Amino acid sequence: MSTELDLNPILAAGWATPADFTPAEYARAEAFYASMRVHDARLLELRERAAGLIREWTGREPRDVGSLGTRLNLETSDLDLGIGFPVADRENLKQVLADRTTFLGERRTSFSTTRLVFSFTLEGVEVDLSALTDEDFLVACRMLDQIAEAMTEEERICHLWVKHLLREQGRLTDYAKWKLVTYARFCPEFNWVPIPEKAGI
């Protein structure tokens, strides 16, 4: 993919804005962003179905904590949903989900808390479910509300173009880190470490 963008200073800064782009580069980014929105209708429908299953299985109301919810998804992006769940009941949750999902393990969320991560597939799309502590889930919801309110469409366009270029160039470690800069910007106390086996998706 042809680009005039020097990705290294952007990665070092941890953010991208139209000021980093030439007019021609921004036009390419804008067109690409529009092309990704074509996938939203199907993904949103699948997300609603996945949320219904999670609601049925866990009794908890899930929230989109991934790239679709922030409108930063690529055409190959999976779905990431989160719920709040009592830590004391986590073993019961594992049993409830054992025959319905694959347990991917326990991941650190903050300096003092962890989340459980499960995965299942719906019409060929992978759905990851994170069971956070109730307190962390509330923080995550506030963070997502803030992203929705404060992150401009221009910033989304720039962010997604950088994400796309990193993947196209095979810079998968940088790609995995870049996927998390939005969360880090709006919720630095969370440690949104990518699941290792999925870092290149």
Image (cartoon, grey):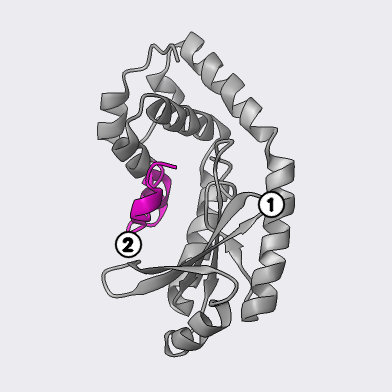
Distance in Å between CA atoms under marks 2 and 1: 34 Å
Kind of residue at badge 1 = Glu
Residue 189's image quarter? bottom left
Identify the secondary structure beneath mark 2.
loop
Magenta segment range?
A: 179-201
Task: Look at 61% across and 68% down and name the residue there.
Answer: 62
Identify the secondary structure beneath mark 1.
loop
Vertical side of 131 occupied by 17: above or below: above
Task: Look at 42% across and 17% down and name the residue there.
Answer: 21
Q: Position of residue 10 (x, y in %)?
A: 31, 28
- Going by the image, does 42 lie left or right of 26? right
Q: Position of residue 154 (x, y in %)?
A: 53, 29
Quadrant where the C terminus is found in the figure: top left
- Going by the image, does 199 lie left or right of 24? left
Task: Look at 36% across and 43% down and name the residue there.
Answer: 176
Residue under circle 1? 123
Q: Position of residue 26 (x, y in %)?
A: 50, 17
**Around disc 2, counting alpha carbons within 10 Å, would you say few (fewer than 14), some (14 to 19), or many (20 or more)?**
few
Magenta span includes 197: yes
Task: Look at 43% across and 90% down and name the residue there.
Answer: 88
Q: What number is the disc on residue 189?
A: 2
Viewer-nearest of labels 2 and 1?
Answer: 1
Q: Position of residue 108 (x, y in %)?
A: 32, 67
Vertical side of 172 occupied by 62: above or below: below
Magenta span includes 65: no
Vertical side of 28 occupied by 142: above or below: below
Kind of residue at badge 2 = Glu
